[in-house]
Amino acid sequence: MVRLHMRVAMASLVVALSVSGTSRAADLWDWRAAEDPKWSIAVFGGEGTDDSFSDIVGDLFRVDGNTERLLAVALRRRIGGYGDHMWFELEGMFGHHYGSQRYGEFGVALYARVHDFPWDDYVVTTMAAGLGPSITTRQSELEFNKTGIRQKTLNQLNLELTLALPEYPNYALLGRLQHRSGIFGTINGVDDASNFVSLGLVVSF
């Protein structure tokens, strides 16, 4: 549990390194977004869950939803890559939360995205992990530390899976786990604050 966030965030990098071949690392890094399209926009929505981040990752098909809902839009820019199987993106996100409370969420994250899988001739697939700050317009009643203190500013760790038809690679279905927490209590004692399991669409251009 203690190291789960870091393990998930680094999973994409581990996969990419394992398939990058024997080329020198200096030749693999490329901070130019060499391939088009460089931009993408994602629209997604889903429901909250009282399950912890580790429970969701451990068994996504047994997640129990609650009354909280999320609608969000995110704009991304590819900023570079590593080898032939990973690129990096910057994302700006705005989410509207509704249910027991209504409030907005602004987030900025850096993503590592693994792509170019062997089965892409059938289903074009990417997997990604993103990390960065998240700020809400109100203190969420769902997010509190052991003393009951809530925080508007927390950390976000998001996991994504996209699937597209080879004929239309710029239009992909999106599955996303949207997670906010205080990084194991580092931010004012807040631990596993909120989780939303979402579905949506990504358009690249």
Image (spheres, helix red, strand yellow):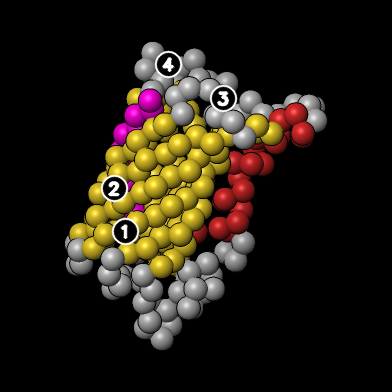
Are discs 2 and 1 less than 8 Å apart at CB? yes
Q: Residue furthest bottom?
A: 147
Span colored in magenta: 196-205
Give the numbered dot on residue 105: 1
Which mark sits nearer the N-terminus, 4 or 3? 3
Q: Is residue 22 above or below residue 45?
A: above
2 or 1: tag closer to the N-terminus: 2
Identity, as a three-letter code, of the amino acid under mark 4: Pro
Q: Earlier in the sequence, mark 1 or mark 3?
A: 3
Left or right: 204 in relation to 69: right
State the mark number for residue 166: 4
* Mark 2, residue position: 72
Q: How many marks?
A: 4
Mark 2: secondary structure: strand
Residue shown at the point (56%, 58%) measured from the top left: 5
Disc marking residue 34: 3
Q: What is the CA distance from the residue labelled 2 to the residue labelled 1?
A: 9 Å
Is disc 3 placed on a helix, strand or loop?
Answer: loop
**Pointer 4 with pointer 2, Cβ within 8 A:** no
Residue 121 position in % (x across, y down): 49, 15
